[in-house]
Each structure stands twice: as structure tokens, then as C-alpha cells.
Image (tube, rainbow, N blue to C red):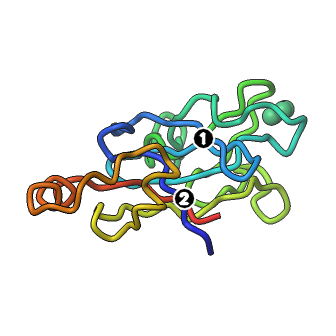
Amino acid sequence: MPRHVVATTAEIRPGERKIVEIDGRSIGVFNVDGRFYALRNQCPHAGAQLCEGTLSGLVTSTAPGEYDYARSGEILRCPWHGWEFDIATGRSWFDPARTRVRAYEATVEPGDALSDEELGAAGYEPGPYTAQRYAVEVDREFVVVHV
Ligand code: FES
């Protein structure tokens, strides 16, 4: 599956997102406590820009007056009508078997694992091939979406 460099890890801090365009598709890339997720930025209900929605967690209850809050930042609510999706899987909360948004694999890779073409296509300078450049690239990690 083709890889697309979309950001450095420093550009998408925990709790933040970046919306990118890959092969004509708008995709939201999210950082949830250092884990990266990528979702198609189109709600399956009526086409809203889903990835501009609010992130929240899950509230569960075992008895009246008792509740737990879990998975903070992993549930994405559509800004138009409030449908909710799990950003890890793209499945909707209300009908996970049938209603979902496309989720893509997102990985974090060191700069020296990426080719100059991959970095250049994303607008990053590959730099000269010197020992000094190598030291800089080893310290940087990039978020890569597999579309
Ligand atoms: S367009 Fe997303 S819930 Fe309606």
C-alpha cells in the first residue's frame, strides 16, 4: 500500500489533528496520546467534513448514578448531526456493523526510513547527504498514512 508522509510528529501534538489531501481524498490525521489515526474526512450520513468534529470519550453506566468515562479523545462526533465514530476503526457507535467511515493505517517512522522522494513529495527538504544531516533526520519522526 503506498505510503504518504503527512507531517512530523511535532506538527500534530496529542489531542490535535491535521487534515490533509491524499490522491484527491481529504483525510484527517489525529494524535491521541501519541497514537496516530487517519480517517476519511467525509461523513457517511450526509457528507459533512467529519474530521472537523469534536473529540470525546465514552460514558458507560452499570447502575443509576454510577458512570465511567473511558477512551478519552477516541470518539469523533460529526459537526452536522452528531453521529459518532470510533477513530481507531472508523465504525459508528450506533451501528458499528453497517455504518462506518474509511479508516487508514497511520504509522510513525524515523526520517532515515523514508526516501528523499517521499519526504520531498510532502514538502520536506531531504537535505545534503552529510553526517550532520543524518543526525538531524534520526531525531525526527514522521506520520505516514497508508492509502
Ligand atoms: S452529516 Fe454527519 S451526522 Fe449528518
Outermost residue on the right side: it is: 46
Label located before the other in sequence (2 or 1): 2
Q: Residue at x 74, y 32 (%)?
A: 49
Percent of width and height locating residue 14: 34, 39
Report the residue marked by disc 1: 20
Q: Residue at x 14, y 61 (%)?
A: 130
> Is 44 left or right of 64, judged from the image as shown?
right
**Of 126 and 108, which appears nearest the observer?**
126
Compared to residue 74, the image places residue 141 above or below, namely below
Q: Secondary structure at mark 1?
A: strand
Compared to residue 46, the image places residue 123 above or below, namely below
Report the residue marked by disc 2: 4
Q: Which mark is residue 47?
A: none
Look at the numbered discs 2 and 1 and tell me whether their residues touch, using CB distance below 8 Å. Answer: yes
**Of 72 and 11, which appears nearest the observer?**
11
Disc 2 marks which amino acid? His
Percent of width and height locating residue 93: 70, 50
Task: Give how far apart the Cα atoms at labels 2 and 1 are.
Answer: 10 Å
The quadrant in which the C terminus is found is bottom right
